[in-house]
Image (spheres, rainbow, N blue to C red):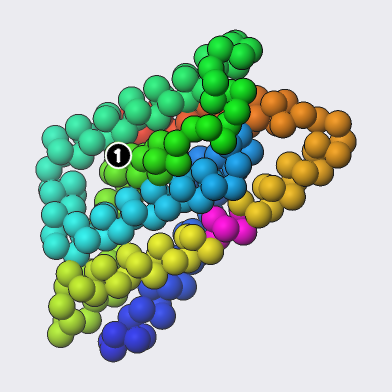
Amino acid sequence: MTIPSAVASFAVVAGLLTIIPGLDTALVLRSAASRGRSHAFATALGISTGALAWGAAAAGGATALLTVSHGAYTALRIAGAVYLVWMGIGMLRSLRREQDLAVRRDPQSARLSGSYLRGLTTNLLNPKIGVFYTAMLPQFIPPDAPHLAMGLLLALVHDIEGMVWFALLILGAQQIGALLRRLSLSRRTVRRSMDAVTGTVLIGFGLELALSEH
């Protein structure tokens, strides 16, 4: 297998996985609906940075620890589950407060770094991402290729595909939001609806992650 053919093959597999709806999709759409395009792209960039970090770790062999050490995997799994449930509960609790936070009155006043860190932390605390890279990347690294450089290249390909997909989602969400506002639904109503849906989804993902064994 040559490097170009390996990259092309991995791009097909990663592309198919990218468009499957999941936690990352929910976070990006929620950011687009509640805080606008800039925050949505910041969230997407954080997710992509996390994926790149997992790719580097997998190429360097670090994530192999997750496949051989049940304790390490369990610890990361529980940490990720707690974080997701905490975020979900926070979104649902915020629905009971009307105008108690400035960021609720002006979503654009929130820092972009917060959205970036939310995406990054969510991805880094998801052990299934690490296991995916550990299982998949070695299959697409030619024997004579430098593992770390090749792993980073494949992770970057996945990131590019992810950012293109997220961009389509964000632009689509903006169009849908504009349509809803033309139908006399305020931005606050749309934001609260997204918080309710996303909060429930996050809790569901967190519980599923906590109860899963692999």
Vertical relation: 80 (above or below) 52: above
**In the rendered structure, which amino acid carries the disc numbered 1?**
Leu
Residue visible at 17% across and 73% down?
A: 147
210 or 38, nearer to the observer? 38
97 or 3, nearer to the observer? 97
In this rendering, the count of numbered labels is 1
Q: Main secondary structure of the magenta part?
A: helix
Vertical relation: 6 (above or below) 169: below
Q: Is residue 39 in sight in this rendering?
A: yes
Toward which corner of the image does residue 94 lie, by quadrant?
top right
Please state if 60 lies on the left or on the right of 169 as rendered.
left
Circle 1 sits in a helix, a strand or a loop, which is it? loop
For the C terminus, the quadrant is top left
Toward which corner of the image does residue 62 lie, by quadrant?
bottom left
Mark 1 Cα shell of 10 Å, populated few (<14), some (14-19), many (≥20): many
From the top left corner, tell me how far across and down residue 45 is, in percent.
42, 53
For the N terminus, the quadrant is bottom left
The residue at which mark 1 appears reads as 125
From the top left corner, tell me how far across and down residue 40 is, in percent.
53, 46
Residue visible at 29% across and 39% down?
A: 125
Residue 131 lies in the magenta-colored region: no
127 or 30, nearer to the observer? 30
Residue visible at 81% across and 44% down?
A: 179
Please state if 116 lies on the left or on the right of 110 as rendered.
left
Vertical relation: 200 (above or below) 68: above
Residue visible at 27% across and 30% down?
A: 79
Please state if 160 lies on the left or on the right of 133 as rendered.
right
From the top left corner, tell me how far across and down residue 26 is, in percent.
54, 41
Which residues are the magenta region?
165-169
